[in-house]
Amino acid sequence: MITWMQKHKKYLIITIWISTIAFVGAGFVGWGQYNYSNKAGAIAEVGEIQLSRGDLQKSYSRLYGQYNQMFQGNFDEEKAKAFGLQQQAFTQLKEQALLLNLANNYDISVTNKEILAMLVKQEFFFENGVFSKDIYKRVLSNNNLTMAEYELDLKKQLLISKMLELLTVKVTKNENNILKTVMKIADKIDYKLLTDKEITIDTSDKAVKAFWETKKNNYMTDISYKIEYFKQDEIDTTYTDEKILAYYNDNKTHFKDETGKIIPLEKSKNEIVAKLNEKATKNMALRNYIAYKKGKLTTSIKLKNIEISKTKNIFNNELLEKVSKIVVTSPYLKPIKVDNSFYVIKLITTIPSQVKKFEEAKEIVLPLYTAQIKKEKLLALAESSLETFKGITSDFLTLDDSDKLDSLTQNDSSDFLEKLFNMDKKSSFIVLNSGKIVLYRIVEQKLLTDVEYDEISTIAELKSKIFNDSLIKNLNNKYNTNILVEGL
């Protein structure tokens, strides 16, 4: 019958992701062998809109965070590749660009006042319940963003929101009457649930390895770097009152309380001493860096060797990013701060990405193999059982009757009924989102007389989805997309 009768309306509405800053506070996530920074560098042109490497990185990072939440923290780069996360990120970015082109054609504009009003409502910049400019700057800095970049993203979001508000969907009286009639239809069915308990799966190394052989290029090691490094000892010294006062006078605007008032000198002394020690430590690290390059590093400084990569990194992503840009002809990296320490790095060699050995990839491959074989075997069982299955006979069912299917969970019941009322076959099977399969046979149908439903909002959701799908399709035809880098 109709998918849009589903009880859970959130699944009905198309989501066009705008470049909001959902990754802020979660940190950037890179991907695979690509080395995209969050700065400029066009990767594609959509109409008059250029898409940068930074835009793609932000879209990817936000998606990665969503999947990682769904996987309860167990999402990684291998799964990201298997899910085609990079392509998903680009598609969402492209749809945003299509809508921005349309907004530009309509001469829709956004004022700085509107951007500010939106900015000060974002709670991840709040301190004690109000917007804090210091926290705003710090959070952006931690995510390798400038205020200009962030506020440009807010402007894009507002432009698209304004434009979509002009394209509202209304429900007609005839549409409402049609839905009222459809909602009165109820089905009595015979049904049977098929689960993976009905099948056996060969999980031997031989079977899994055969599956891995067909997809092994999807399972690559990270690019890794052998480095030599030393950690600069922290300097902790005593400073004269004159030195502390001079630093305070030069930097007093950095010492503010939660109300924005400048903190007096006496209450800032400990922080000033820490800043002076940090500056002295960095200067010493720079001197030792120069000596290191000249082969004159003092023997009291102990050099260490280690191999680092995305998944094996004792430092942080910023340092790894910098190491990845070092060239053989200039292998030294100037002092870089990690946590509260300064490190000086020398690149020894770069180890390219390569196909993982089966033993290394098995842990990742096994669940994917199991899921695919389970799906194939369940489908085969459903097809062979359809004509002769004996199941449970239900009461008359509508979309709101998920509690009347005894052998199914609440989620599986809702999923089944949504799909059942979208089927045009009297007898068939339905694959649920959980991977289970339900065989069904419609025994009888009738019209109910006491059904109440929010028809208007349901039709509006359906029409919005159809409209949004058609809008993106037409904009794809209207605005040309020119890919500037390989792999997209």
Image (cartoon, rainbow, N blue to C red):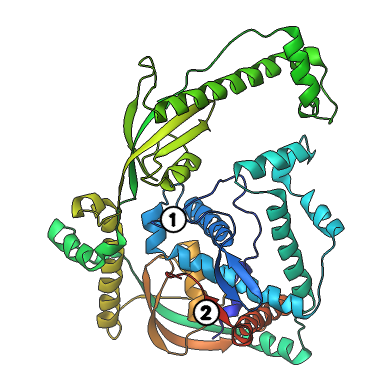
Q: In the rendering, at what x and y percent does residue 425 appear? A: 43, 89
Residue 459 location, quadrant: bottom right
Residue at 76% from the left image edge and 10% from the top image edge:
242
Q: Would you say 476 lies left or right of 298 here?
A: right
Asked if disc 2 and disc 1 are in contact, CB closer than 8 Å, the reply is no
Find numbered disc 2 in the image and state the secondary structure of the residue it sits on. loop
Query: Disc 2 or 1, which lies upstream in sequence?
Result: 1
Task: Locate the N terminus and report the quarter of the image it occupies.
Answer: bottom right
Q: Relative to residue 313, is residue 60 depicted above or below? A: below
Q: Alpha carbon of mark 2 to alpha carbon of mark 1: how far?
A: 50 Å
Amino acid at the residue labelled 1: Trp
Local packing at callout 2 (Cα closer than 10 Å; few below 14, some 14-19, many 20+) is some
- Of residues 330 and 169, the one nearer the viewer is 330
Q: Would you say 431 lies left or right of 456 here?
A: left
Q: Relative to residue 71, is residue 316 depicted above or below? A: above
Tag 1 residue = 31
Q: Relative to residue 430, is residue 412 depicted above or below? A: above
Tag 2 residue = 396
- Res 122 visible: yes
Amino acid at the residue labelled 2: Phe
Q: Would you say 398 lies left or right of 325 here?
A: right
Q: In the rendering, at what x and y percent does residue 154 appear? A: 73, 59
Q: Nearer the viewer, mark 2 or mark 1?
A: 1
Which disc number belongs to residue 56?
Answer: none
Q: In the rendering, at what x and y percent does residue 359 appear? A: 19, 50
Q: In the rendering, at what x and y percent does residue 372 appear? A: 29, 67
Residue 126 location, quadrant: top right
- Of residues 133 and 433, the one nearer the viewer is 133
Find numbered disc 1 in the image and state the secondary structure of the residue it sits on. loop
Q: Would you say 106 lies left or right of 182 here?
A: right
